[in-house]
């Protein structure tokens, strides 16, 4: 605190001292005004974030952890015991021995016969053979809005000498000795990861509407087993294809897990990767669950990748730009965000003529011109950018570097400094026609995790998060390729179990979301 002068002391001061005191007071008032403006700006932005429209809001709310971990919480890392079909198709899972017809609860039964042809029988037995009682097993089929029981009858044959017994071929099951069918598991997957329904709600709906009791623990167990037995290897195959793309997007978001060997409240992270939106190749979306936000995770996921990664200003990616062979491109949406927050907090009239509005107008001009190039090829787009976009970018950075010298505290200053610090990465799009202006594609890939967040229950382990990451990867990749997730997962659950009998896993190509060999029912009808 400076010295306080009395009236007599001021009257006795020289002219030079009075001038010095006045200038000092002006400096203090200016700093006070700057601090006051920054504080008012922060209050306005806080009010805007709390009460205003959230068009710029991309952060995920607390509680998204539950989207990843519900399956693990319910299954408790141990597969739920497989029920007898008779205990499932009833109001209460109580088995009554010898009451099979009553236990079926009136569900229609399809008799599916598996037989050998006469030619095959003659080849195996000659003319002497007899048919023994069929081997009978049942599988619970799911048809949207209804259930039915598939009762499989496998023909069993024996030679007249009763020494040789042959059974007809039977289809490969998803899991050995399980009543679940591809259609049923696809429906559960679709309900949980596309429609965002918690298991307890599906459990109640199945029992209330269809008199079929499938416990939430059982459904969670099926989901976990489906990933571990079949979907994991397909995810790995997609990952290998992903690394062949020229450009990709990356982002990450935090997620709470209570029991992962660390103190309570420690954050884990879901890393999201998506192929470039300007690529002519089919899109792939992949999620990678990790306990930390360390550089080692994207380094491992992007091992040997030599393309361009579009991302925000997080330093982890910049380390990869220096240490690895890949390049990093910056995000102009992040550059404009702080200016947008200030403008929205001040309102249309209050923001008129401010530095934040001027910055926002310049960035908007860059976007406006860039949007006119969206239909061009990467080569044509790059050429046009040099003529119409580069001058706007040069003018923006020249202006920013001038304004930052005289700007006070607050979000406007932080926005200017962000642009200067990220200039190297924000300019990368000018060198490659396949690189977009921003990383919005990766941020859009995060949105499914927060939809329906109030439906999920907090749990405490991470194995379910890893399984959910695999399923969300396939769901979002299917959606990006205009597939119907339920039909696509049904097809995957039918075909992936067969791969165990193939030495050459190149058959996976026929299962890819963009494969022309996919059944037509998997494809979403495109609007004309």
Image (cartoon, rainbow, N blue to C red):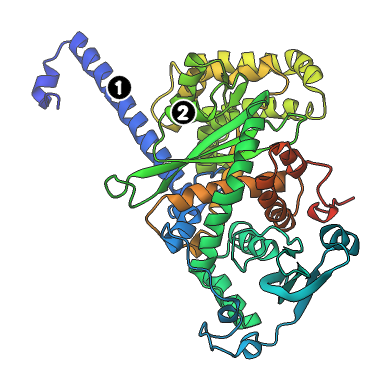
> Disc number at residue 26?
1
Residue 190, percent across and down? 65, 60
Q: Nearer the viewer, mark 1 or mark 2?
A: 2
Q: Is residue 3 above or below residue 42?
A: above
Residue 445, percent across and down? 60, 43
Residue 240: which quarter of the image?
top right
Query: In what element is the residue under mark 2?
Result: loop
Is residue 457 in sight in this rendering? no
Q: Horizontally, is 422 left or right of 210 in the view?
A: left
Q: Spatial distance from mark 1 to mark 2, Cα to Cα?
A: 39 Å
Residue 463, percent across and down? 44, 50
> Disc number at residue 148?
none
Q: Is residue 204 above or below residue 41?
A: below
Nearer to me, 64 or 221: 221
Residue 484, percent across and down? 75, 54
Is residue 308 in sight in this rendering? yes
| Residue indicated by mark 2 | 314
Q: Horizontally, is 222 left or right of 367 in the view?
A: left
Nearer to me, 40 or 387: 387
- In the image, what residue occupies the spot 67% across and 27% down? 436
Residue 11: which quarter of the image?
top left
Q: Is residue 431 above or below residue 85?
A: above
- In the image, what residue occupies the spot 56% across and 58% down? 223
- In the image, what residue occupies the spot 83% across and 45% down? 517
């Amino acid at each position: 605190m400076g010295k306080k002068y009395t009236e007599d002391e001021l009257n006795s001061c020289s002219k030079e001292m009075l001038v010095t005191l006045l200038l000092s007071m002006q400096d203090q008032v200016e700093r006070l005004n700057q601090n006051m403006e920054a504080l008012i700006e922060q209050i306005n932005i806080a009010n805007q974030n709390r009460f205003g429209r959230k068009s710029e809001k991309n952060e995920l709310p607390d509680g998204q952890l539950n989207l990843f971990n519900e399956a693990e919480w319910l299954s408790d890392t141990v597969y739920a015991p497989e029920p007898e079909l008779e205990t499932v198709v009833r109001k209460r899972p109580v088995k009554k021995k010898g009451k099979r017809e009553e236990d079926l609860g009136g569900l229609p039964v399809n008799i599916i016969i598996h037989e050998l042809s006469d030619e095959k029988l003659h080849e195996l037995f000659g003319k002497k053979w007899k048919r023994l009682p069929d081997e009978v097993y049942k599988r619970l089929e799911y048809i949207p809005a209804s259930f039915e029981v598939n009762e499989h009858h496998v023909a069993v044959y024996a030679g007249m000498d009763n020494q040789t017994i042959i059974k007809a071929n039977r289809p490969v099951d998803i899991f050995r000795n399980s009543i679940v069918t591809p259609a049923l598991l696809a429906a559960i997957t679709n309900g949980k990861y596309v429609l965002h329904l918690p298991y307890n709600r599906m459990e109640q709906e199945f029992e209330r509407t269809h008199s079929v009791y499938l416990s939430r623990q059982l459904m969670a167990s099926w989901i976990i087993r489906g990933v571990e037995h079949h979907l994991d290897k397909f995810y790995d195959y997609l990952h290998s294809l992903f690394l062949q793309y020229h450009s990709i997007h990356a982002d990450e978001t935090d997620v709470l897990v209570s029991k992962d060997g660390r103190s309570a409240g420690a954050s884990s992270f879901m890393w999201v990767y998506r192929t470039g939106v300007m690529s002519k190749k089919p899109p792939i979306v992949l999620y990678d669950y990790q306990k930390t936000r360390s550089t080692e995770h994207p380094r491992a996921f992007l091992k040997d990748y030599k393309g361009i990664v579009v991302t925000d200003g997080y330093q982890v990616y910049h380390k990869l730009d220096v240490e690895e062979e890949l390049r990093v491109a910056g995000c102009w949406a992040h550059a404009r965000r702080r200016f947008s927050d200030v403008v929205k907090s001040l309102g249309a009239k209050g923001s008129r003529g401010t530095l934040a509005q001027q910055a926002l107008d310049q960035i908007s001009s860059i976007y406006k011109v860039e949007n006119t190039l969206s239909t061009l090829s990467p080569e044509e787009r790059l050429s046009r950018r040099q003529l119409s976009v580069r001058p706007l970018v040069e003018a923006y950075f020249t202006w920013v570097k001038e304004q930052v010298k005289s700007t006070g505290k607050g979000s406007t200053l932080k926005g200017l400094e962000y642009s200067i610090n990220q200039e190297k990465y924000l300019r990368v799009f000018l060198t490659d026609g396949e690189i977009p202006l921003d990383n919005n594609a990766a941020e859009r890939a995060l949105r499914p995790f927060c939809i329906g967040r109030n439906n999920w229950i907090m749990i405490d382990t991470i194995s379910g998060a890893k399984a959910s990451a695999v399923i969300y990867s396939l769901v979002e990749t299917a959606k990006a390729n205009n597939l119907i997730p339920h039909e696509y997962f049904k097809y995957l659950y039918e075909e992936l179990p067969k791969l165990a009998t193939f030495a050459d896993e190149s058959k996976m190509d026929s299962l890819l979301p963009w494969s022309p060999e996919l059944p037509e029912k998997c494809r979403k009808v495109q609007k004309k």
